[in-house]
Image: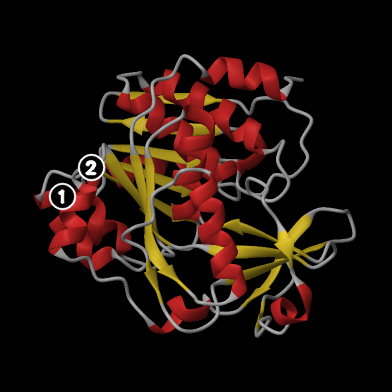
Amino acid sequence: MYTPAELRDRLASVPAPSVVGIGDDVLDCYLHEDLAYPGGNALNVAVYSRLFFGADAGFVGIVGDDRFATHLLNVLDELHIDHERARRAHGANGMAFVSLDEEGDRRFVGSNYGGVQHGLRLRLTEQDFAYLQGYDRVHTSVYSAIEPELAALTERGIRVSFDFSDDAPAGLLARIGTHIDVGFFSGGDLTESEIDDLGRTALATGVGAAVVTRGSRGACAYTDDARAVAAVVPVDAVDALGAGDAFISGFLAARATGNDIDGCLEIAATAGALACTYRGAFGYPVEAGDDARAQLIRRYQPV
């Protein structure tokens, strides 16, 4: 088992590319603790880039105007993550709800449909594009609804990474692959041959590098001339929430410095392990309370 200090030492030599997360942000409400932690894929990638690599980082997205949104923005300020291009809208911030199952594992059990983000779409302006061009790359996800903006990003020379997760709509990869420098996929339920097929399919659509995480089996990465596999890095885990987003941050940091995909996977797995030593995605909880629980309006079926 590695200690958090040992994991940080392994990451210390990796230069810090600047990153902007575009799109989703939530408060992960732990019902069994009555605490809500800032999170969301796009926001987490920016935060981990800052926390683990000291990167200049920014966030562009839509947040609410409730106390949870205020807490989230205050945390970004404390971490020195720029959010000058974020939008605030009247209403509840996005919220996801987490509970414990019979084995003690954390499960997402519901949401508030993304709060104010559900009825709005982030439209990037020329001021946004100028802002984004000041960073090394942007990261977004299938949960961020900015697919219509991807062509305009790449036309301006902005490198884009994209988390397809495991539930991207049919045909999405074929439509946007040519705009994606690095595509990330969740393949924990796939066989090894299915994972290889997914990686090769992503490359065929134009994705520059494809990475498929496999849960406890580690991850695979693909480029046109290479395939690499990495195991998970052992750590005494406190909470695995956000580990996949930290993995993305690590892969992007290593890729920006010219590492081959074996090296990128090693740094990514180390960052993912370090995230498991935090409660919530990266800490900074706020009391949830009745106003959080009242937002549980969408319930997920048990796995």
In the rendered image of this protein, does residue 91 appear above or below residue 272? below
Residue most toward the right? 102
In the rendered image of this protein, does residue 26 appear above or below residue 284? below
The kind of residue tagged 2 is: Arg
Q: Which mark is residue 154?
A: 1
Crowd tier of the residue under label 1, counting other residues whose Cα lies within 10 Å: few below 14, some 14–19, many 20 or above: some
User: For this rendering, which residue is in front, 230 or 19?
Assistant: 19
Q: Quadrant of the N terminus?
A: top right
Residue at 63% across / 49% down in the picture?
281
Residue 186 visible? The answer is no
Residue 67 visible? The answer is yes
In this image, 76 relative to 206: left or right? right
Q: Is there CB contact under 8 Å for labels 2 and 1?
A: yes
Q: How is the image coloured?
A: secondary structure
Q: Secondary structure at mark 1?
A: helix
Residue at 17% across / 55% down in the picture?
129
Q: Which residue is mark 2?
A: 159
User: Alpha carbon of mark 2 to alpha carbon of mark 1: how far?
Assistant: 6 Å
In the rendered image of this protein, does residue 66 appear above or below residue 206? below
Residue 124 position, x and y percent, is: 22, 65
